[in-house]
Image (spheres, rainbow, N blue to C red):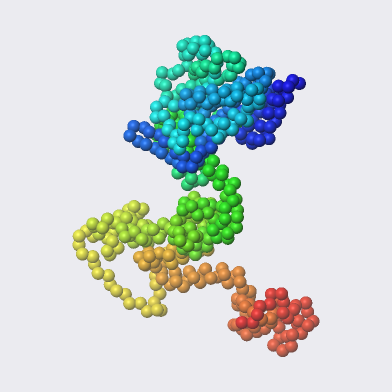
């Protein structure tokens, strides 16, 4: 094994230990591989796109990485630099050419030493400064495409440039590709266009805006399975890479220009990286004050961060009690609310359905131009034009007068209702029976207690006031009684033990029985049951006397 071969092997092993699998992939069949380098951005870095008189500008923290594909010749590093290709979606051909030439100069300055790690550090820390990009990246508004830069001999480059037949007539959909291979140290360093390729993918992933991504919390980065290394022949895996913009790509039902698609790609990548960074950062919950990873926390739109457990319990409690307007940020000085998607993920589908229904009901009750259809079989919300007393239900198509709640009678005065004086013993005549299921009764009760006065009157006319205020509460209480009580062995009345020993006296029949085994006890000498049996006078379920 030659000295160059040993240095190459040591360098590749060092790169493998320094970079992760998503940053470095080695081709085991030969001395080659790929490096994916993310440039460091300064604070408040902006990306901008100007199209006509429209300026789109966003603050970002991450840019898609530069892809450095390299192959080490046999006489590297002593005599020849690596052959490489530099690819980036957001840099122009001129900028990539300048970076590629600088990489070659860096090798020459080493005097025959290994250089791949130095190249990666230069691209990461100094690439933007070298290109005079400070805090703003302006995307070209015309044709733009992913650039691959390379260096070849001057005569071959000029010949290929003259005879190139790959440039399409339409222009915007092509990707210019140039192979830049370093010549020997004595060769003249000349940069020319050597090849133009069409490299667009037909199945481009759907792009979404940065705000949509942050609200929904999920995104799929576009990627291409193709790579510069021939996997079928070399058996090497390629790093995932961003697909170039596609002219057939659509956003919000309209076609994207290549520049718009590139901007969308940058925003999507930035949002995904910010989410990844958030998931691996430790935050202090604003409720329990415990330090947890971001993957176990939720950040609200107001910026406050809480652990998922605390925020979930807080939202579930508010929704269970019917206080849907209380589903806000737990911080005392903040009234921001979580997004519907966040509420759904925190409380589950069942409680979210309840939250959505109650929130809609409270919203409708607060709207002065909303009335309810007076039909007992309908009761739907109806938007009312205040310029008229007429309203039309969009569900059952019933036209009614909003004043008297009867069939619309035109401009005639409403007929006065005959007042009916009812005593407490007068039975109301409901037009519908209350639901029989526990879920249905709970939903009806929540609707009744949280509704406006108008909504309550409507429900009372449908189900009857007594059914709602007495019967419904009694039905809901039966479930609690069945769970928290036992039956007297004499009269089978429901009994709840709230303290004392295991000698129980039924409230209704006044007889004694044992709470442990529910045996009937005599009025005299009942303590013998505990002396001669297995039951204890004071069992483990003893409660202090009340």
Q: Quadrant of residue 170?
A: top left
Q: Residue furthest left?
A: 412
Left or right relative to 406: residue 488: right
- Nearest the eye: 403 or 209: 209
- Nearest the eye: 544 or 32: 32
Give percent across and percent down for residue 372.
34, 60
- Nearest the eye: 78 or 37: 78
Residue 140 appears in view: yes
Q: Quadrant of the C terminus?
A: bottom right
Left or right relative to 161: residue 108: right
As displayed, is residue 170 above or below residue 242?
A: above
Q: Quadrant of the N terminus?
A: top right
Give percent across and percent down for residue 190.
52, 16
Residue 207 appears in view: no
Residue at x 69%, y 88% (from the top left corner)? 523
Left or right relative to 297: residue 422: left
Residue at x 68%, y 29% (from the top left corner)? 12
Count the marks: 0
Q: Quadrant of residue 451?
A: bottom left
As displayed, is residue 17 above or below residue 230?
A: below
């Amino acid at each position: 094994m030659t000295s160059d071969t040993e240095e190459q092997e040591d360098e590749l092993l060092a790169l493998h230990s320094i970079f992760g699998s998503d940053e470095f992939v080695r081709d085991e069949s030969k001395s080659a591989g790929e490096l994916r380098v993310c440039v460091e951005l300064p604070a408040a870095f902006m990306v901008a796109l100007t199209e006509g008189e429209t300026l789109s500008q966003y603050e970002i923290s991450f840019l898609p990485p530069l892809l450095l594909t390299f192959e080490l010749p046999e006489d590297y590093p002593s005599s020849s630099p690596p052959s490489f290709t530099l690819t980036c979606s957001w840099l122009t051909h001129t900028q990539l050419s300048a970076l590629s030439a600088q990489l070659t100069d860096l090798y020459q300055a080493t005097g025959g030493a290994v250089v791949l790690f130095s190249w990666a550090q230069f691209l990461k820390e100094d690439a933007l400064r070298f290109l005079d990009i400070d805090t703003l990246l302006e995307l070209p508004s015309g044709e733009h495409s992913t650039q691959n830069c390379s260096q070849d001999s001057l005569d071959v480059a000029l010949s290929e440039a003259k005879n190139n037949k790959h440039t399409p007539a339409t222009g915007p959909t092509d990707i210019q590709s140039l192979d830049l291979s370093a010549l020997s140290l004595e060769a003249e360093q000349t940069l020319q266009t050597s090849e133009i390729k069409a490299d667009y993918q037909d199945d481009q992933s759907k792009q979404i805006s940065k705000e949509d991504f942050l609200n929904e919390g999920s995104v799929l980065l576009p990627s291409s399975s193709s790579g510069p290394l021939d996997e079928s022949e070399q058996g090497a895996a390629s790093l995932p890479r961003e697909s170039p913009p596609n002219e057939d790509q659509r956003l919000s039902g309209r076609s994207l220009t290549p520049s718009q698609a590139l901007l969308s790609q940058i925003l999507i990548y930035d949002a995904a990286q910010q989410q990844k960074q958030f998931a691996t950062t430790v935050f202090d919950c604003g409720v329990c004050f415990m330090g947890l990873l971001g993957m176990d926390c939720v950040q609200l739109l107001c910026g406050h961060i809480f652990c998922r457990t605390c925020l979930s319990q807080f939202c579930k409690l508010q929704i269970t009690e019917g206080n849907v307007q209380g589903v806000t940020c737990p911080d005392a000085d903040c009234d921001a609310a979580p997004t519907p998607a966040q509420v759904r993920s925190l409380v589950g589908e069942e409680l979210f359905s309840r939250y959505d229904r109650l929130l809609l009901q409270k919203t409708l009750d607060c709207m002065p131009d909303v009335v309810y259809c007076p039909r007992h079989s309908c009761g739907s919300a109806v938007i009312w034009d205040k310029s008229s007393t007429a309203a039309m239900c969009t569900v059952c198509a019933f036209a009614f007068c909003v004043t008297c709640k009867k069939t619309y009678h035109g401009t005639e005065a409403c007929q006065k209702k005959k007042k009916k004086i009812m005593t407490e013993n007068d039975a109301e005549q409901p037009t519908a029976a209350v639901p029989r299921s526990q879920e249905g009764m709970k939903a009806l009760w929540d609707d009744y207690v949280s509704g406006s006065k108008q909504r309550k009157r409507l429900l009372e006319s449908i189900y009857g006031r007594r059914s709602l205020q007495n019967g419904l509460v009694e039905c809901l209480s039966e479930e609690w009684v069945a769970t928290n009580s036992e039956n007297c062995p004499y009269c089978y009345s429901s009994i709840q033990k709230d303290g004392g020993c295991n000698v129980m006296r039924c409230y209704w029949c006044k007889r004694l029985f044992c709470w442990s085994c529910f045996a009937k006890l005599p009025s005299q000498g009942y303590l013998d049951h505990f002396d001669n049996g297995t039951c204890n006078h004071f069992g483990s379920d003893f409660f202090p006397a009340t």
